[in-house]
Amino acid sequence: MTGCDSLLKITYYGKTSFALEFNETVILLNPGIWDGEKIVPDDFMARVVISTNQADDAVGNAAAIAVNSKAWFLGNKGAGEKATEQGVKPWLLHELKPEVPYEIPDVKIVPYALTRLEGGERMENLGLYIEIGDMKVGYLGDTIIRGPFEHLDMDVLITPVGGDGVFPVKDAVSLCIDAKPRVGIPMRWTSNEEPQKFAKYIEQFGQGVIPVVMEPSQVLEVQWAAGNEFRYELN
Amino acid sequence: MSENRKVVIDLEETEKSELGETSELKNIEASGVLSVNNVSEKSRIWNVKVLLNESRDKTDIGEEILTAGEVDAGGKWESEYGISVKAPIVTFTEVFDTCGTVETEDPHWAYVLGKENPVKITLTIKNETSGELDNIILNKTIPPELSNIEVVSTKSGVAEYDEGTKQIVWKDFVIYPKESSELVISATGTVEDIEPKSAGEVVITYRGEGQQRSVLDPDLSALTEFLTGIETAETEPNTWECTLECSNESDLIVRLDKAEVYLTPEDGGAKQKMIDETPGIEMSPDQEWRSSFQVNSKSTPKCTQELAYTPAKTVAKRVLGTIEKKAQVIPVYDIEYTKEFDPPSVASFDKTPVEITIEVKNTGTAKLNEITIEDNLPDDIMPPTSEHISVWVRGKKFSGPFEFTIDPEDQDPEKPHKMTFRVEDLKDAGGELEPGESLKINYAVMAWRNRPEKEYPSPIVCTANTYPAGMPVVDESPEDGHKLGVIYKKRAISTKKAINKGSGAGEYVVVLVVANNGEVTAENIEVTDWIPAGFEYVSTDPEDEAPEVFPVAEGGNYMVWTWQRMNPGDKKKIKVTVQGEGEYERREPEVTSI
């Protein structure tokens, strides 16, 4: 699947970090820091960097990446404040508000207020509905609730599966069954058994949803061939 | 009948066989006793020799001639010998079939624990010789596990069950050459523990008159009271008639084999054989035999004689046999299963994948060749697809063939489903399930919005069988067994309402806040609020939360919002602008959900 203008490349960096690349637009999602380790290098070049909440595993080194690549930093209020503390210039910062779309050429992002549990406390987390090219991608970030996502028409749904303040496997599977995206991608697992179970359950009960378990550095290419045939390929 | 008395050479040979559990020959020993029986009432025999010559093959007799010395009238001389044989003259087979009601090529060989096993015992004796077998007596020990013992059929003879000795005795029959006879017994086998049981020994004795296991062909050489002499009588001058006279003085029959008379010439020189006969006759007691010749001689002729005679013999032979068959060991088959849900309980009104793991363990003492698991899923459970089942045997992933069916063959969670897993011919797919080993299957189902007030039993029936398959052993749950737990999560949808003055005249802003404060996702939420008569619906903020508005008979309009799902903590704030005249009467909104 090369040489096609409608190709969306989804690159996985581990945990909850993904990059969506369409034409020359790169959107980096949740470049978090986990156990002191950066998932995405500081010199990563993106046009938009988004953190869906203010926790370190979501903001991570987003500020450094945004500064280095002169990218927009998008996040809710808490994430924006944290990014500002870490050096993001105010003119490159855009606060995402629930259900208020953010648009740039080829990209429209609608955030929805979701929730994660952090130390037993609720923390706002934004679920992102991203229309990029002719693809519709749902990215739940770190969420323990599904919000309106079961009603959204999605080609790709990226959902946490690891429990511990976010969806466990069962809720991720349940959402995929209800929302029926074409591809379901698990993230943020804490054991290798979780994505395997996710895939196993989606294969059995997903009623057409294709589970794609990505390893870090793997790239999933998706496109609507001829405008009406969904194709995907995992490198 | 004294004139018919012959010395009896008796060959009484004995064979003793040991058969294994399945009637295979384990050991055979054969031996014999050769005896010379002087049946005379008065005549001793002496210089007795038994001539065996080349017929000693298969025996351990070292000499061609056995010297018996003298045997008094009515006496006996004996010599024992060993015989080398490979098989008895009788073939015996016992078929102990623990499930005689199911016909199979090979018999069933294990009891089902706690069931009434329809046992069929078939005992077959075959005469492998060309002579008759008689004096056959078969004793079959009936083990204590068997009851309702009945002799179903006997091809010949009489078979009876002795309750006191717990023995079946079969006797009073002969078996003709190369033929066989059969006894069929039926019984009910009931075992209450898994220890292997004895099927009972069998002992058979038989007699084959006129038969022998060795190839001994004995002859006899002996002397007895036998009078011989030469009478010389001058019939004319210098002419003599010489007569050899023999007389059997014993009460035995004597066979005269050779009679020779030699004449010594008057003038010396070599002796001349004058009588040379091999009469070979058997002389009865007191019978005489003579032979004569004439010779010219001036003096009384000088004759000498050479005779060969022996008491006549007859050979009697028989085979006495014993077969002892070792009791077959009958193991017992039994299974136990476990069934687990992971998680054991699901939240009500949710969709939750549940792993079902069923393990069937061989808790008996017999090897199992096939396992069947019938698992029943209630409604509100989405069954798996048939390709998503994992199977382990002996703790290792099983790659052999198995069958997994789902009835009905769909994934409709509104219907109950029966799933049947069957693995046959384990013997050809890695080996039968040995005692202590287990088979485990795992598959996932999707609990589908289960209701807390409802019960979800998932009964199971596990069966197992041996090879060949007979009566299956069953371990099953009660019909209402294995209930999937449903954790009741409280539903709590709250609605709050405020009526605020709007910016324009007669304009009001009705604020509705609907929140799911419960512990479970609410679905199909329907909120209804009333607009009093005189007021009209204008708009909603946010716009995509606009309600359906329709008039009501009593006056005014209803606004109805429907949401498919609200998660715990979800909240919706809706501002509805209405406009009209008069007092805006407040009524509380109504909310319903599942």
Image (spheres, grey):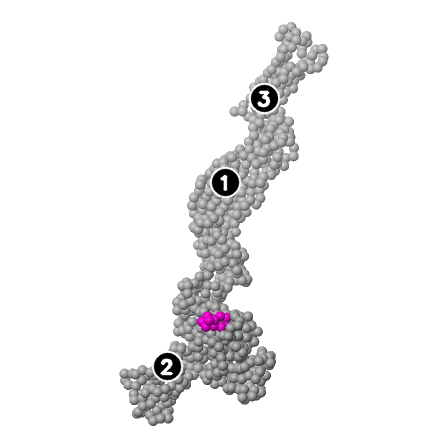
User: Is residue A229 within the magenta segment?
Assistant: yes
Q: Earlier in the sequence, mark 3 or mark 1?
A: 1
Residue B429 at x, y percent in the picture: 52, 56
* C-alpha distance separating marks 2 and 3: 134 Å
To which chain does the residue with label 1 belong?
B
Where in the figure is residue B244, as x and y percent of width and height?
A: 62, 15
Within-10-Å neighbours for mark 1: few <14, some 14–19, many 20+:
some
Q: Label 2 belongs to which residue?
A: B561
Pointer 1 residue: B126
**Image vertical order of residue B293 relative to residue A226, above or below:** above
**Mark 3 falls on what kind of element?**
loop
Rendering quarter of residue A179: bottom left
Q: Amino acid at mark 1?
A: Lys
Relative to residue B21, is residue A27 depicted above or below? below
Q: Secondary structure at mark 2?
A: strand
Q: Is residue B308 left or right of residue B411?
A: right
Region rendered in magenta = A222-232
Discs 3 and 1 share one subunit: yes
Q: Return the disc, 2 or 1, that comes first in the chain's sequence.
A: 1
- Looking at the picture, which amino acid does disc 2 mark? Trp
Which corner quadrant holds the C terminus of chain A? bottom right
Crowd around label 3: few <14 · some 14–19 · many ≥20 (10 Å): some
Residue B212 located within the stretch drawn in magenta:
no
Give me the disc on residue B280. Answer: 3
Q: Are the residues flagged by discs 3 and 1 in contact, CB closer than 8 Å?
A: no
Q: Nearer the viewer, residue B390 or A140?
A: A140
Residue ID at (30%, 91%): B581
